[in-house]
Structures are given as C-alpha cells and as structure tokens.
Image (cartoon, coloured by chain):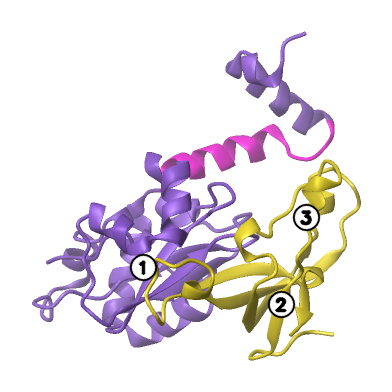
Chain colours: A purple, B yellow
Amino acid sequence: MTTLLEADTDRLLAAVRALLVQKGIATPEEIAERIESTDAASPALGARMVARAWVDPEFRALMLSDGARAAETLGIVMRGAPPLGVMECTEDTHVLVVCTLCSCYPRAVLGYPPYWYKSAAYRARAVREPRGLLAEFGTVLPEGTRIRLVDSTADYRWMVLPLRPPGTEDWDEDRLAAIVRAGDMIGVTQVHA
Amino acid sequence: MTLAPGTRVKVRDDWPETRGPCHIRTPHYLRGETGTVVRHLGDFPNPEDLAFARPAARLPLYHVRFALPAIWPEPHAGDEILAEVFGPWLEEA
C-alpha cells in the first residue's frame, strides 16, 4: 500500500478534486475559480490596502475593524476566504504575525506565503526570540518599542498595517503601494521610502 | 455566555494528545498560562471535530493577550502575544 506521503501528487490532487465533486462539496467550476483567485492573489493586493489606509482615514478605520470588507471595497475577491484581521504598527508597538501551529497566511490579500514562513525555525523563533529573528531580516526596533506578536492559531488570517515611512508625505497612493512588500505586512520588515 | 473584553482567563492545562488522536488549535506554549480577553472574534465550528468529519458545534473564539516575558525569558518587558483561543479552553482566572 502506498502511503499518502509517497503518493504521486498529481494523481492525489486529481483524486481529491474528483471526490469533492462526487460528494457534492464543490463543483468543478468552483474549484477552478478558487485555484484561479489563489494563483492571482499577490502582495500587490495587500499593498494597495496599506497605501489606501495611509491616505484615507475612513478606509483605515474600516480596515482595522473588518479587513475583509475593506479588501472588498477595493475589488479584492474575499468570497469563501477566512475572516481577515488587520493589526496596525504604531510608534511604540511593532506587530509580527506567525502561525506556530502550521502555516495560516492571509493568501487572499498576500498570495502564497514566502518559503520561510512555514519553516519550523521561523515559527518557533517568532514567539521565543522575536528580536533576534527580526535582526536577521535587518529590522532593528528602536529601544522601548514593544512587540505585539499575533499567533494565527484558528479561523482568522492576520496582516500587518505597517507604519508609513517618513519622507512620503506628498506621495500618491500608487507610489506608496509600490514600496510595500510582503515582509512589511507580515511584520518581519518595515517599509522604507 | 460570552466572555467580556478584559476578563482574566487561564488556558486549560490539558494535553488531549496524550490520550489519543486529536486536532487542537491551542498551542502547547499557552496551556496553563493566564491572559486577558481582548475581544470575541465570532463563533466558529469546533476544529477538534471538523478534523475528524464529526458534526461540529460552533464555539466562541476569543482573541486573548498574554505577556510574552511570562512565557519565555528572551522577550522584553511589554512584549505581548495575541492568540485565538476557543471558549472551552478558557476558564476565568
């Protein structure tokens, strides 16, 4: 008998897709639609949300209270996605997101996670020694900044609203969105102009 | 009954994995620790049943804040962790 880990992944995928249809859990069209939206999602979506929040206080308030609704107002497809929570960095608090149990990630707005996000090392060190971990990403927090770690343990997916960097006061939304990277929205890095 | 924000809670020091196959969303490092309810995030089907295709009751899910230095020595004073914890794992502290 072949175990799950030894199985040919293409055949395994085909079998699971067939079962989902056979059992009436999802139609082939729904499966194709979800694959398409998952493949299409990228950090550029989250970056648009961040840039909008930096220039529009009303959007910022909505984003912090209901991330999924805020995403939808920008035309981002959230149907079927888990609830999205957004945590903001402030002058005295830096937010870092991890999923210590597995690899929960806000894929609808950030796309596929970076390879290290799922690593045992990242997951363990984020909670145990976050400053050492951040330093390896080149992030050194000012003395006195506290860390708010968000462990994505259940049904929500979390993203970070990073601090707007100084020197960008007269930038428009598109220019702002272009400097926001996935790491800034996980909290391993900060946005630099 | 829904726990109000600010309620002090203790995560049950329970280890179902020592009793048999299970799927739990409460990390090891938080069991037995005391924290504060930040808010009720909503009610979600119990993952411990969902994982085994059993009928799953909807349970309250809370965002709970813990002081990080109380759990590990490395973090600085003021550092904190927010985790999602299901109601049955919490008792009032």
Q: Disc 3, disc 1: CB below 8 Å? A: no
Picture disc at residue B15: 3
Q: Is residue A24 part of the magenta span, yes or no?
A: yes
> What span is in magenta?
A23-41
Quadrant for the N terminus of chain B in the image? bottom right
Say above or below: B16 vs A4: below
Q: Position of residue A10 (x, y in %)?
A: 59, 17
SS for tag 1? helix
Question: Regarding mark 2 in the picture, which secondary structure is present there?
Answer: strand
Residue placed under numbered mark 1 in the picture:
A49
Q: Label 1 is placed on what type of residue? A: Met
Q: Is residue A5 left or right of residue B78?
A: right
Figure quadrant of the C terminus of chain B: bottom right
Q: Are marks 3 and 2 in contact (CB under 8 Å)?
A: no
Q: Residue furthest top?
A: A1
Image coords of residue A91 (percent x, y): 27, 84
Which residue is found at the position 44% from the left and 74% from the top?
A: A87
Label 3 sits on a secondary structure element that is loop
Residue A101 located left or right of residue A125: right
Point out residue A111 in the picture as x, y percentages from the top left corner: 42, 47
Residue at 23% across / 71% down in the picture? A141
Left or right of A148 on screen, residue A133: left
Same subunit, tags 2 and 1: no
Say which residue appears at 71% left-offset and 27% top-offset: A16
Residue at the disc numbered 2 = B10
What whole-number distance in Å separates the C-alpha atoms at marks 3 and 2?
15 Å
* Discs 2/1, front: 2
Between A27 and A53, which is closer to the camera in this rendering?
A: A53
Height in image: B31 above or below B37?
above
